Amino acid sequence: MNHKVRGRKFKRDSAQRKALMISLAESIITRERIKTTTAKAKELSPFIEKLITRAKVSDLSAAKAIHGTLSDVSAKKLLGEIAKKYEKRNGGYTRIVKVGERQGDAAEMSIIEFV
């Protein structure tokens, strides 16, 4: 039994999972809406929301942590535009909308976007 086991593995080791989440986070920050599998969207949502909450603090240590995680272009957009957009909102920055199954392998697809 898998009691208290949190998160999905996606058949990847921990470094690959971290790289996947960073890549998806950069995509959603630059495009503000991406289409991916539902499982990946559900894992991405808390990851990106923690980054936004960190960016809202807007101090030097938060900026360094975000620049250490994301690329420069994504970090600047997150700290500049997106953090200011959600300044008065307490959580719930993303929305997941299910859009059906992918034709090739019938994986359940979703659109994850900023609210």
Image: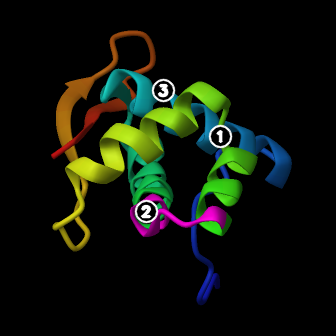
Residue at the spot of label 3: 27
Q: Earlier in the sequence, mark 3 or mark 1?
A: 3
- Residue in the picture at 60% in, 89% down: 3
User: What whole-number distance in Å separates the C-alpha atoms at marks 3 and 1?
Assistant: 11 Å
Q: On the image, which quarter does residue 22 sit in?
A: top right
Residue at the spot of label 1: 70
- The residue under label 1 is which amino acid type? Leu
Q: Residues within 10 Å of mark 1 (few under 14, many from 20)?
A: some
- The residue under label 3 is which amino acid type? Ser
Residue 43 percent coordinates (x, y): 48, 54
- Residue in the picture at 81% in, 54% down: 14
Q: Which quadrant is home to the N terminus?
A: bottom right
Please tell me which residue lies in front, 64 or 5.
64
**Left or right: where does residue 76 sit relative to residue 81?**
right
Residue at the spot of label 2: 46
Residue 20 percent coordinates (x, y): 66, 37
Foreground mark, 3 or 1, reads: 1
- The residue under label 2 is which amino acid type? Pro
- Residue in the picture at 17% in, 67% down: 89
Please tell me which residue lies in front, 35 or 72.
72
Magenta-drawn segment: 54-60
**Left or right: where does residue 62 sit relative to residue 13?**
left
SS class of the residue under badge 2? Answer: helix
Q: Earlier in the sequence, mark 3 or mark 2?
A: 3
